[in-house]
Amino acid sequence: MTEWFPFLKKQPTVAVIRLSGVIGATGRGVLSDATLGPVIEKAFSKGKPAAVALEINSPGGSPVQSSLIGARIRRLAEEKEIPVIAFVEDVAASGGYWLAAAADEIYADPSSVVGSIGVISAGFGLHELIGRYGIERRVYTAGQSKSMLDPFRPAKDEDIERLKELLEDIHVNFKDHVTARRSGKLPEDRDLFTGEIWLARRATELGLIDGIGHLKPHLKDRFGDKVKFRRYGIKKGLLSRFGARIVADALGAVEERAEYARFGL
């Protein structure tokens, strides 16, 4: 109607991007820049939204994919001059908080889990198990670090030190991102980059988020009761919609459940 009668006032629209799940490069249902890229581009480009809202529920995952997704959001926000507001559901931790920090403002439910600004690497040592069954591991490499942290061989001190260096470098990148995005809001006398988590009220006091709030009520207060919401997200395949699962999906669900369980969810 407003196209035919331009003098009519157009109601504001908010594009809502749902970011729910573990962040990773591959796997069904994971959040990656490849799968989310077209979704994010469309949300910023369709019409002229008054704002883009990020609906976040993620325990984290790949630091690279977190960075790529966050960088894409910031680039589009600055190019199109559209404010970005994040709303946390159950959790925005680790890479999930990286995504939240890509927004200009962050709000959460009082019981939402926020933080975990750290880096983790976990694995298994299976050398004793295979030795018990008389299995010999044979690995041939060119380059002394090519088989670093082989789970079928005893851990080497030099490999562990090298891994710690890599994790520390990634941690620095994470801290730089949060410090830049939350500039002027974080306390100078408190180390918030220990991997610790907080509920939303405490996170507000620490400057990690901007307050308590839910998506629709908050945005209606800001843009009026007649604001329209246009939702964007990763579309599920036909089999997933009917609840069908294959082995890979089941394993992925277990891994995702384990990630959420780290935060008591």
Image: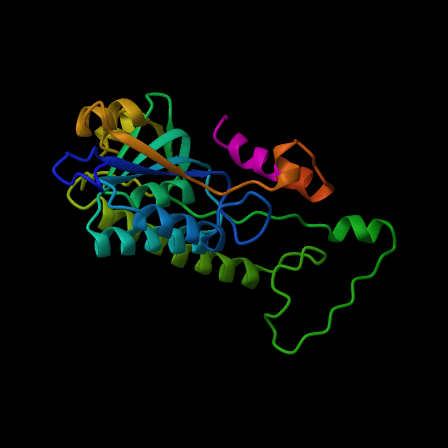
Q: Is residue 63 above or below residue 207?
A: below
Quadrant for the N terminus, please. Answer: top left
Q: Position of residue 14 (x, y in %)?
A: 28, 36
| Residue closest to the far left | 7
Q: What residue is shown at x 57% (from left), y 37% (from top)? A: 256
Residue 214 appears anywhere in the view: no
Q: How is the image coloured?
A: rainbow
The residue range painted magenta reads 253-265
- Magenta residue check for 17: no
Q: What residue is shown at x 28% (from left), y 31% (from top)? A: 228
Q: Is residue 125 above or below residue 197?
A: below
Q: Position of residue 169 (x, y in %)?
A: 39, 59
Q: What residue is shown at x 55% (from left), y 63% (from top)? A: 158
Q: Position of residue 130 (x, y in %)?
A: 80, 52
Q: Position of residue 192 (x, y in %)?
A: 30, 40
Magenta: main secondary structure equals helix
Left or right: 28 in relation to 70: right
Quadrant in the rendering for residue 250: top right
| Residue closest to the far right | 134
Frontmost residue, 263 versus 257? 257
Quadrant in the rendering for residue 105: top left
Frontmost residue, 262 versus 48? 48
Residue 204 appears anywhere in the view: yes
| Residue closest to the far bottom | 142
Q: What residue is shown at x 15% (from left), y 34% (from top)? A: 9
- Magenta residue check for 262: yes
Frontmost residue, 153 versus 91? 91
